Structures are given as structure tokens and as C-alpha cells.
Image (spheres, rainbow, N blue to C red):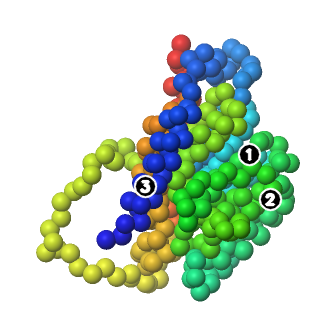
Amino acid sequence: MNLLPLKLLSIGLSCLLVGTTAAAPLNSPEIEKQFSQVLQGKAEQDFTVGLALGAGAAKGFAHIGVLEALEMAGIRVDMIAGSSMGAIIGGGYAAGLSVEELSDVALNSDWLDVLHLLDPVFPTRGFIDGQKIKLFLEDLYGSKNIEDLNIPFAATTVDILKGDLYVIDQGSLANAARASSSIPVVFNPLASDDLVLVDGGMIDPVPIDVVRSMGADFIIAVNVLAFPEGKNPEKSFAYLDGNELENSKSRWRIPKGNEPWYTAGKPNLAEIAHETVILSMALIAANQVELAKPDMLINVSTGLSAWNFLEAEIAIQKGFDETQKALEKIKNLD
């Protein structure tokens, strides 16, 4: 039995219970009212808005749609905390990349582009070294440091050895995003002295408390690991017949027609490792958003695999649609 998801869930919830319930202030009805008035065009935004952009690998392309919807609604983003893909997208936005530029990067990539970013190594700590991704991020961000960004920004990462959460709020933006998105087993982790740093989503998939600590008056949390409507994450089990179980095998073949190339051998070792991590993150995120109580929660269920980097358009549209729904709800509070 693989105990990794249970162990990570236990670590994550312990951190949340210690950090979130003690620190989270009550949401201000007055700020919420002001936010509603801004959406209605009745007031200027004289309070700060902080974004907590969550982990989710390819699901995180939804953050681009979220940013687009906020811009269309006239909401100014004053600070961003990101985890994993949330750190990559949020870091780019904080560095001055427009929604259009972020969309172009996401939408104009094919499977050859994705493969070009992968540098497989003998798996001592990960299957992929990650140096090509770091170079890509440096090129995308213009080799900027966090303290020089247009919008205050922070990324989360975790020391896998002790389960401690770290916030990166200065220095290389590319290194911060790379550390925050170092999916265990899949990517080689970064290091700092004795720390072995992996994906921030392992225990902080939606960094609400981080953006709260940055001083945001109104916090918008984006959970791209939301369970689909109708799925009850509290249902702990279902039943199977043991006589119907058999050894599973990957089925490598050439994709047919318009079938995505990554379904040709489903699931392979890397995908199983990744989806194990994603499941743990999703369970932690569901509890985290309940405990941390952001002023506005945007739950996005993209319906995509976490490995599906070739259908960003679907994720972006989902993020846009769910944000518009959430904004409309607050707009109509009066």
C-alpha cells in the first residue's frame, strides 16, 4: 500500500491547523461591500486585493483566465502568492507579462515544445533535471528578481525532509518558480544548504495565508484542484469485487486521429507518480480553503489531466467562466 498520499495529507493538514486557524482574521463585511461597489462601478478600489494562485500543473493554466476576468471587471491586483503552476503564472503576471502574453505561451505550444523542456536524467532524485525549465523561465521573466517586480510576489516551496513550508519573496524569480513547481519524483528538487525543496503544493496548494501575511485587505483564492460538481470528496470509499482485479500495464502505441499523444501509454510511471501527488494536493486544498476562509473563492474543475499541457485553451476558459460567476455573485450582494 502506498502511504505517501496519507503522509503528505497528514503533514499538510497539521500545518494548516497550526498556521491557519490561529492567524486568519474574520472577513470584513465592509471590504466585501466595497468590492461589490467597485464591480458595480460605484466606487474606486481604495483597498488592496491579493491573489492566492494554487497548484495544479496543467490545470493551472486556468489562472490565466482568472486574471483576464479580473482585468475585465476592473479589479486591480496588488499582490500575489503562488504555489507550483500558480507561482509560474503569478510570477509572470507580477513581472509585467500581460494576459495576452501568458496566453500566447500557453496556447502556442505543441508536444515538441513540451518535450524540448524535458531533460531526463538517471532518477537519483527525479526523472527530469529541470535545467531546461529554469532557462525557459529566465527567458520568460527576463531574469528578474522578485524584489524588482511590478506587483509584490511570493512563491511557496517545501523541504521534503522535514515537511517545513518556505516562502520565497526575494531573489531570482525563475529559481522561485522552479522550486515551487518541483513535483516530487518527477523533477529534481532544488536545494539550499541542507534543505531539499519540492513543490509548494505538497502542503500549501492554495497559499491563502501567505498572501494574507503580505497585507492584502481582500483575498481571492483560486483552487484549480477543485473536485468536479457532483463528486463528494468526503465519501471515503466505494466497493470493488476482488475477482475482477488484474495486473495493470501501460499500453504504448501511436495516437489515433486527433487523440492527444500523451494518452498513448496511459498511465506511465511518471504520470502515476504525478497523479499521486496531485490527488494529495487536491485533498489538502479542499480542506485548506475551508480553514483559511478567503474573501472570495474561485473553484475551477478543468476536467483535464494534470499532464495535459496541450489543451490550455480549455483550462483558460474554465478559469475565466468560474471567475465571472464568482464576481457576479459578489456584485449582486446588494
Residue at figure coordinates x 77%, y 42% from the top left: 152
Q: Position of residue 322 (x, y in %)?
A: 52, 39
Residue on which disc 3 sits: 9
Task: Give the side of residue 1 with respect to residue 32, left or right.
Answer: left
- Looking at the rendering, in which quadrant would you find the N terminus? bottom left
Q: Which residue type carries mark 1? A: Phe
Which of the labelled discs sits on residue 172, or is there none? 2
**What is the CA distance from the residue labelled 1 to the residue labelled 3?**
26 Å
Q: Residue at x 58, y 82 (%)?
A: 124
The quarter of the picture where residue 24 lies is top right
Tally the marks: 3
Q: Comparing marks 2 and 3, which lies closer to the viewer?
A: 3
Horizontal relation, residue 262 to residue 107: left or right: left
Q: Position of residue 7 (x, y in %)?
A: 41, 60
Three-letter code, disc 2: Ser
Q: Which mark sits nearer the N-terminus, 1 or 3?
A: 3
Q: Name the residue at 45% across, 78% down.
A: 269
Mark linked to residue 153: 1
Near-viewer residue (91 or 329): 91
Q: Nearer the viewer, residue 290 or 118?
A: 290
**Residues at marks 2 and 1, CA–CA distance in whole angstroms:** 12 Å
Q: Earlier in the sequence, mark 2 or mark 1?
A: 1
Q: CA distance from mark 2 to mark 3?
A: 30 Å
322 vs 176: above or below:
above
**Left or right of 132, for residue 60:** left
Q: Secondary structure at mark 3?
A: helix
Specify whether residue 130 is in view: yes
Give the structural element (helix, strand or loop) at label 2.
Answer: loop
